[in-house]
Image (cartoon, coloured by chain):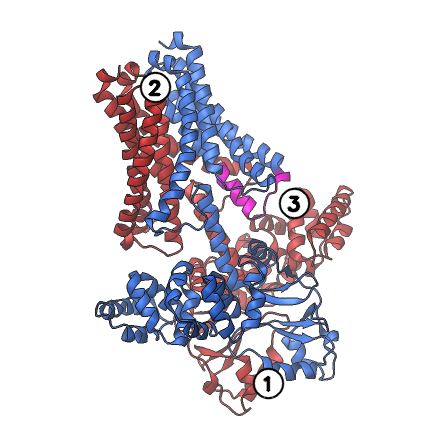
Chain colours: A blue, B red
Amino acid sequence: MANQEQIETLRESLDVLIEDQDFARAAELLSGFHPADQADLIEEQEENDAHSLVQALTPDQLGEVLEFLNEELRAELIQDLSPEVLASALDELDEDVAADIVQDLPREQAEEVVPLLEYRDSIAELLIYPEESAGGRMSVDFVAVQRRWTVDEAIQFLRNEAPDDNHPFYLYVVDDEGRLTGTVSLRSLVTAAPETPIAAITSEDLITVQAAEDQEVVAERMRHYNLLALPVVDVAGKLRGVITADDILDVQVQEATEDFNRLVGLPEEERIFRPIREAVPPRLAWLMINLFTALMAAATVSIFEGTIERVAVLAVFMPVVAGMGGNAGIQTITLVVRSIALGEIQPRDAMDVLRHEAIIAVIKGVVIGVVVGMIALIWQGNALLGLIVAVAMLANIVNATLAGVMVPLVLKRLRLDPALASGVMVTTFSDVVGFFVFLGLGAIFVDQLT
Amino acid sequence: MANQEQIETLRESLDVLIEDQDFARAAELLSGFHPADQADLIEEQEENDAHSLVQALTPDQLGEVLEFLNEELRAELIQDLSPEVLASALDELDEDVAADIVQDLPREQAEEVVPLLEYRDSIAELLIYPEESAGGRMSVDFVAVQRRWTVDEAIQFLRNEAPDDNHPFYLYVVDDEGRLTGTVSLRSLVTAAPETPIAAITSEDLITVQAAEDQEVVAERMRHYNLLALPVVDVAGKLRGVITADDILDVQVQEATEDFNRLVGLPEEERIFRPIREAVPPRLAWLMINLFTALMAAATVSIFEGTIERVAVLAVFMPVVAGMGGNAGIQTITLVVRSIALGEIQPRDAMDVLRHEAIIAVIKGVVIGVVVGMIALIWQGNALLGLIVAVAMLANIVNATLAGVMVPLVLKRLRLDPALASGVMVTTFSDVVGFFVFLGLGAIFVDQLT
């Protein structure tokens, strides 16, 4: 296995070769390393160099590396390849990975490449399902034995069909129509008498997933039941493929990234080095939505412009009242969004969550309110100002916390993504309500404050 | 497999039995379902009922369910069990899960239980490693064949030792000292001549992990190399155990939750239904830190109290300048923290990221600045105010975005968690700098503004 130092050395040698534009030797140098590491190093190159480097890979090497390249760069790099080269590289890959790549090809290129593929039939089947569904993620490279066989027949079959790499495998049992009926363990196969019917040693307790279901359901089910592999069936119960936990590791990371991004209004798949012309429009769009909400806060303040003119110190505490409410709300919203994502709470739990968070909010609000009130009193030497700050603080922390519970749960109930823009809605609530309560109290007692 | 409706029906029947305090029948009813679902339903009960229900489970059932119960509830529930009952339940579990449970037991109970365990030796070995290390997560239930054996000897060994459940397995090859030297595929075993030496069909290209490494390293490595199983070796290269991808699904979810929580200042393992007396102190502590930063913003505003008294309309635009900066900064920080977590960027990439985000920030700042400036002009009929708002907006968006890049990268360079409190530092920057620039410009032009 390549350790960090070996990869560092490789990186340096590679830089020299690429500086010299010696891509043939660079490709050869790479070939000594794991394809995942090769892919990383190719991703680090300038666009032109990455193209030349990929052109210089042998077909075997290219196939292995394609699996690990990030999707965008991969889509770009393979546009230069001839259909023949691409097809022979794709034939090196697991069908599900090859299908993902074919799915992303421009239609014209796909039509040229698919007929050249060795496994075009299984790939065609995989292309039926959306990429992010169970069917799109499954591997069709599973081992199934017939229920009506004997143990001896099954062992003969395995001798010919056992996968030739170290992929661990489950032995699935199917009936004459290909419907999944259970699994047999390797141990029971090697210890049972040869004439024993497979049906007699089949274990029928099986967790499956429908091919059309979303990959998030697959991830949740595998995690919930601690599964290493999950068989995929179609509506008729026929075994179509198998999803293994290593494929789901990527799915989980992708789903978590989506949640992070949605909470702050970024596109789901946003990455740090997206080209600037693509990165700017969605971020600007989000700031425009934020601007609308910030203007609502400004409009609230403007109602009390006259009060602020008379008691300018109110402006000093505005950021405290609004900011603390916002922070309390953001904590709650993060907890709620994450709990929904992990299936720990449902909209029907809203009242329980609300009650729980309300108690916490009141305690937080009272403590912070008293502390901020005391600070205002000592700093500005004004007891009434302290009291107003304290009350506004309490009201706003409770308000923002409850908004933090309700916004994602309501979004979920409306079958929208709970993380979608939750953050900005809660900060808007906390700004508008916070300013209104605080400046409103200021306006009521304006004569006493001056 | 139990579908959602079956579980719903089960939940209702269970509620009735628990209302009647008929825990024996409740336990029996549960036993028809997957232990993961049994655990979920036990977690939903009131504390007293959960205790009685767990007491009523058969030892086999208890063992299976313990694996899936959440850690805190599990630790509580098993305190009531006698050492004998607990030991026989633990013997039903994989050693790594049993070791995790033993690790969480009060010392006295652990000392009573461990000597009663069937697999006490392997559990004792697992207890050497921290729970969240490779060694703590590994299973010791792997299949290793000796390098000096023949194929025939290996097959005889497998006949006796093949795992009896459907755990897929890799066949690891070890030398006389137990050092891992490679793997053999099942296919090569069944197709090679019986007298072939194992050494001749061993594949030696192997990715491993050290037992002492953190689970985050394990997750990253499995994901990077798309592995379903990762062998764990000690410093001498001896094979100690195997980690499978299903165990890492949980680790990934846990690590993502930690990142979410740290960004908003929650305890790493915070969950929505933490008891109130435990939930309040950390959240209050965080709000206190926030309070300190909010007061810095307030202090900045207070410098300009005199200006606000003369031009109260400045207070109206304060939340816009600060809030928009904060939102831009939070977007950047989320991207950067997530990219660091996924290993996509390192501190050495700081200049690249900074340049990239700076360009985006200037574009965002100019557009938003012009829009906000126009709104200020139209709304308040004051061109100078519009210009001041626009300039402050641009300055603050750039400021907050760059803080969003630098704060997590500096934390990472200091070997701290990049997500740690990043959010609050960036909002503080954006409040303080935003108010200072905006109100400072207001103060300079105060005579023209009135």
The residue under label 3 is: B44
User: Could you give the CA–CA distance between mark 1 and mark 3, rounded to whole angstroms?
Assistant: 48 Å
In the image, are marks 2 and 3 on the same chain?
yes
Q: Residue at x 51, y 30 (%)?
A: A361
Front tag of 2 and 3: 2
Name the residue beneath numbered marker 2. B380
Residue A206 position in % (x across, y down): 67, 64
Say whether marks 2 and 3 touch (CB < 8 Å).
Answer: no
Among the 4 quarters of the image, the one containing residue B349: bottom left
Q: Nearer the viewer, residue A244 or B282?
A: A244
Give the residue type that dot 3 points to.
Glu
Residue B398 coordinates in the image, percent (x, y): 29, 38
**Residue at the spot x=68%, y=43% of the render?**
B48
Residue A32 found in image quarter: bottom left
Circle 1 — which element?
A: helix
The first of marks 1 and 2 along the sequence is 1
Residue A332 forms part of the magenta stretch = yes
Give the mark, 1 or 3, whose residue is nearer the N terminus. Answer: 3
Q: Residue B21 at x, y = what percent?
A: 76, 44
Eye-nearest disc, 1 or 2 = 2
Marks 2 and 3, the one that precedes in the sequence: 3
Amino acid type for the residue under numbered disc 2: Gln
Residue carrying label 1: B156
The majority secondary structure of the magenta stretch comes to helix
User: Element type at marker 3?
Assistant: helix
The answer for how far apart the CA atoms under marks 2 and 3 are is 56 Å
Say whether residue A396 is left or right of residue B439: right
